[in-house]
Image: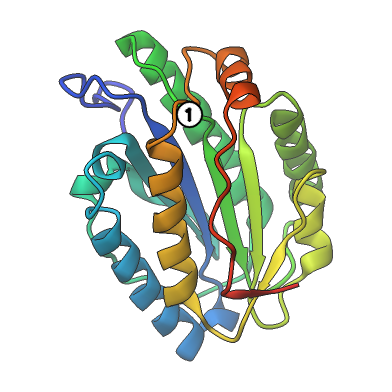
Amino acid sequence: MSDLEARVKEDNPDPRVACALLLDTSSSMHGEPIQELNEGFRVFCDEIKDDPLARKRTEVTVITFGGVARVEIPFTEGRDLEPRTFHANGATPMGAALDLGLNEISAQKQAYKTAGLEYYRPWLFVISDGGPTDGPAFDAAAARVREAEAAKGVSVFGVGVGSGDLAKLSELSTTRQPLLLKGYSFIEMFSWLSASMRVVSNAGTFGSTDAGVAQAEATEQNPLPPPGWATW
């Protein structure tokens, strides 16, 4: 998305929760995994529209990393989110995807501030079935993610698929361990994600700055649904 384009609909005064989905679309996801991922994302697009607040408060960007890291879907309100067919190809540049995700979240928060909108703590949701193939870039990006998490600027979630490298995913957060997907239960996982967005967007834990959001979170607890799609 060009910097000259509007990143938010300013006629919607509601607070926003930015959710960056980082999806591994490397060649090892070929076949059933990528098919189930596509079906799960389709369900997510449908279900996020069901809640009257989540549909206009949740903003989703999809970043894929298969061969290269790219923004497949720029930040889009839930009510306008449409399914996309992703294809498996290439290596796993997870580090580049993490950097891109953080950059997109930072730009989105700035857009909120410019528009005078409040926001919830953004989500960085990373799904991968293997280890990163851009080692040094991953190490630097993972440190950057941990720093953003420590500053209360983002909530980090890691999900391993199949033989996904949970050790590497665990480097992304000091507060939340990654989970392993049961088989290819992408539909269940994305249903959980849409339900979680409903919980967040119906809460009062928003503010005009990261510090303000953290203060609101300290006074209101909103437990997420149990992740029945995962194994510990």
Please identify the residue farthest to the left as the structure is shown: 11
Reading the image, the residue beneath label 1 is 120
72 left or right, relative to 101 = left
Image-based side of 179 in relation to 60, left or right = right
Residue at 28% across, 61% down? 47
Residue placed most toward the observer, 134 or 170: 170
Q: Tell me the kind of residue under disc 1.
A: Tyr
Q: Quadrant of residue 10?
A: top left
Residue 24 screen position, x and y as percent? 55, 66
Q: How many marks?
A: 1
Q: What is the basis of the colouring in this image? A: rainbow
Placement of 34 over or under 141, stated as above or below? below
Dot 1: element: loop
Q: Is residue 135 above or below residue 32?
A: above
Query: Taking the image as drawn, is residue 135 in sight?
Result: no
| Residue 98 percent coordinates (x, y) | 62, 46
Tell me what residue is drawn at x 40 percent, y 83 percent: 35
